[in-house]
Image (tube, rainbow, N blue to C red):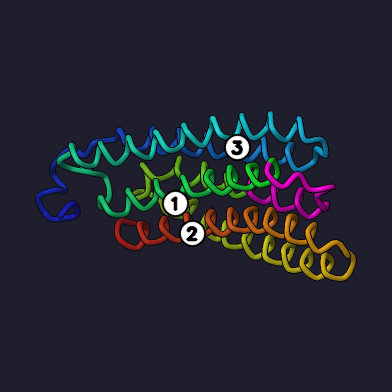
Amino acid sequence: MNNSFFSKFTPKEPKFFPILKEMSNVMLIASDLIIECVQKSDHESAIEYYRKIKEQEKKGDALSNQIFDELNTTFITPFDREDINRLSNRMDDVTDYINSCAKRIVLYNPRQLPESATELARLIKEGAVCIGKAVDELDVLKKDAKKIKEYCTELHDIENRADDVYENFIIDLFEHEKDGIEIIKVKEIMYELEKATDATEYVGKIIKTIIVKYA
């Protein structure tokens, strides 16, 4: 076990922290791009933003695979292997949902996205920023877990705000949009944004599990 008596006296590989930091940076870049993407109404811009976001999504996948490979070749890890793997996978999920949203914007070519799309995209970025700060604190978790706990709470609050935005969007959509096809298009795009905010909160839950084990 990584947290056994003997492992306390064995040097632990710090290489996972820089990779996780790179993943948080990928997430942040993708969140900036989706904010801009949902504010554009022309199809050509959507295609270009999707291309840029897809590049970040590929980087995220490569980093997640790198974490997996390192876990299989590293004797002593800073946290449980399962927790590190789950953390990297869930961070990658955030970027995947952003990519999925951009892809649907290109495929569906909606007339116009509501202002709530921008609100959700900005909340995704808030979550990405928060995750980045939490990842920065992981290597000093055992010394002081206060900040990282605050970031986990913040991620939960962001997700609650996103739920409110999404629920209000649904109410408004069915009250004012009369085109059934357009309803389907916009609803699916917004659902991907909402899932991205759910994924940021899930990252916080995994970090909280790590806190319980090691702080």
Q: To which residue does mark 3 refer?
A: 30
Q: To which residue does mark 1 refer?
A: 90
Give the amino acid type for the residue marked by disc 1 in the picture. Arg
Q: Is residue 73 left or right of residue 117?
A: left
Q: Residues within 10 Å of mark 3 (few under 14, many from 20)?
A: many
Q: To which residue does mark 2 refer?
A: 202
Q: As displayed, is residue 106 above or below residue 202?
A: above
Q: As displayed, is residue 177 above or below residue 81?
A: below
Residues at circles 2 and 1 in contact by the CB criterion of under 8 Å? yes
Give the amino acid type for the residue marked by disc 3 in the picture. Ala
Q: Residues within 10 Å of mark 1 (few under 14, many from 20)?
A: some
Q: Main secondary structure of the magenta part?
A: helix
Q: Earlier in the sequence, mark 2 or mark 3?
A: 3
Residue 58 image position (x, y, % from top left): 47, 33
Q: Quadrant of residue 45?
A: top right
Residue range highlighted in magenta = 107-126
Residue 207 image position (x, y, % from top left): 42, 55
Reply yes or no: does residue 96 show up in magenta.
no
Q: Earlier in the sequence, mark 3 or mark 1?
A: 3
Q: Secondary structure at mark 1?
A: helix
Q: Nearer the viewer, residue 196 or 2?
A: 196
Disc sitting over residue 26 in the figure? none
Residues at circles 2 and 3 in contact by the CB criterion of under 8 Å? no
Q: Quadrant of residue 31?
A: top right
Residue drawn at (63%, 49%) of the image: 124
Residue drawn at (45%, 40%) of the image: 136
